[in-house]
């Protein structure tokens, strides 16, 4: 799902959910990228508490479960996503330690210093990178890790486009984002850009393939056509300007006290 605030507010939730819920993921990413981000983290134990914030239907959560021990709580605003998330966890035979709950990232149901790991792929923009890093820090144990993806410039070149300012108003260079991470009280462990196929093959290909069925389902209604149009624009914009921007994984550690 893209960072278009108008899209969230202008469409009813059911319409958005119906478009996105049958996709394997609701944003760019890949199992390899999730695994790579995990490679910077010390091994967790069965007692570890992990939160996946803005988990969607749980594409990345199942990968997280495969490569970590511990309990994982997925949180998403949309109950329909959470329902599918819990079905996916059951299918992957990990419902004993992977549970999805409906909730908002600005009001998380955790205790202070309860979590060993906070994960969030393609979702922190909903609260804002800086605000999310600052507010979620309280839930991490000293020494706990945060790993998030966030839209960033991929080179020194800048693109002045309405699309970028509408969709990614907080876009910055990786060095700028790392500084925000440091100032929010984390030691930066690593950052790396997601490869192009995380957008094209893993996300846009499925999002495009969904459009005809979605339009049929909604009888080509005005809102459905508008959502489809926005998706097509997002894909075309990425194709044209992908050298400029992309998602970067940022991994940081709350210092031991
Ligand atoms: N992590 C998933 C989904 C990314 S899309 C993936 O990479 O595939 C962003 C997700 O954030 C959506 O599932 C959306 O429902 C969720 N979201 C948006 N605002 C939220 C909020 N305030 N609290 C929790 N989740 C939110």
Image (cartoon, rainbow, N blue to C red):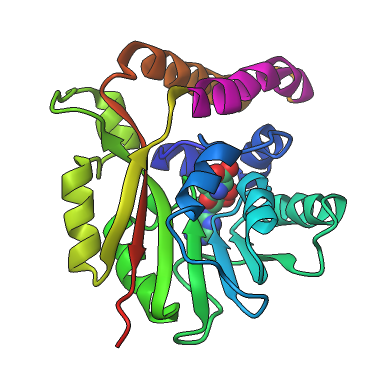
For the residue pair 38 and 206, the one nearer the viewer reads as 38
Specify the principal SS of the magenta part: helix
Task: Point out residue 182 in the picture as x, y percentages from the top left corner.
Answer: 20, 64
Q: In which quarter of the image is the C terminus?
A: bottom left
**In the visual, does 228 lie left or right of 96?**
left
Q: Residue at x 40, y 13 (%)?
A: 239
**In the visual, does 11 lie left or right of 151?**
right
Task: Point out residue 34 in the picture as x, y percentages from the top left corner.
Answer: 53, 46
For the residue pair 147 and 54, the one nearer the viewer reads as 147
As for residue 11 lying within the magenta part, the answer is no
Q: Which residue is drawn at 55% across and 47% down?
A: 35
Q: How many labels does the image show?
A: 0
Task: Point out residue 210 in the picture as x, y percentages from the top left corner.
Answer: 69, 22
Q: In this view, does 194 lie above or below 131?
A: above
Q: Is residue 207 above or below residue 97?
A: above
Q: Which residue is drawn at 67% across and 76% down?
A: 46
Q: In this view, does 255 lie above or below 41?
A: below
Task: Point out residue 181 in the picture as x, y percentages from the top left corner.
Answer: 25, 61
Dividing the picture into quadrants, the one containing residue 217 is top right
**In the visual, does 119 lie left or right of 13?**
left
Q: Which residues, given as a range, are shown in magenta?
A: 197-217
Q: Is residue 8 visible?
A: yes
As for residue 202 lying within the magenta part, the answer is yes
Dividing the picture into quadrants, the one containing residue 158 is top left
Q: Is residue 26 visible?
A: no
**In the visual, does 142 lie left or right of 55?**
left
Q: Which residue is drawn at 59% across and 67% down?
A: 103
């Amino acid at each position: 799902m893209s960072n278009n605030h108008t899209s969230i507010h202008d469409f009813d939730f059911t319409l958005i959910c119906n478009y996105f819920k049958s996709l394997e993921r609701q944003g760019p990413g890949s199992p390899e990228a999730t695994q790579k981000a995990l490679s910077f983290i010390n091994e967790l134990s069965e007692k570890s508490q992990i939160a996946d914030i803005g988990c969607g239907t749980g594409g990345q959560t199942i990968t997280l479960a495969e490569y970590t021990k511990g309990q994982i709580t997925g949180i998403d605003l949309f109950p329909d996503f959470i329902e599918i998330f819990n079905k996916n966890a059951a299918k992957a035979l990990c419902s004993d330690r992977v549970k999805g709950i409906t909730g908002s990232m600005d009001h998380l149901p955790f205790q202070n210093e309860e979590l060993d790991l906070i994960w969030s792929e393609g979702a922190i923009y909903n609260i804002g990178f800086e605000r999310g890093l600052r507010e979620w820090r309280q839930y991490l144990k000293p020494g706990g890790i945060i790993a998030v993806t966030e839209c960033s410039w991929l080179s020194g070149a800048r693109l002045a486009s309405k699309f970028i300012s509408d969709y990614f108003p907080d876009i910055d260079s990786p060095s700028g984002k790392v500084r925000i991470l440091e100032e929010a009280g984390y030691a930066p462990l690593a950052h790396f850009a997601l490869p192009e196929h995380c957008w094209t093959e893993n996300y846009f290909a499925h999002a495009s393939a969904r459009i005809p069925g979605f339009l049929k389902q909604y009888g080509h209604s005005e809102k459905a056509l508008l959502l489809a149009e926005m998706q097509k624009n997002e894909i075309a914009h990425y194709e044209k300007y992908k050298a400029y921007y992309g998602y970067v994984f940022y991994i940081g550690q709350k210092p031991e006290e």
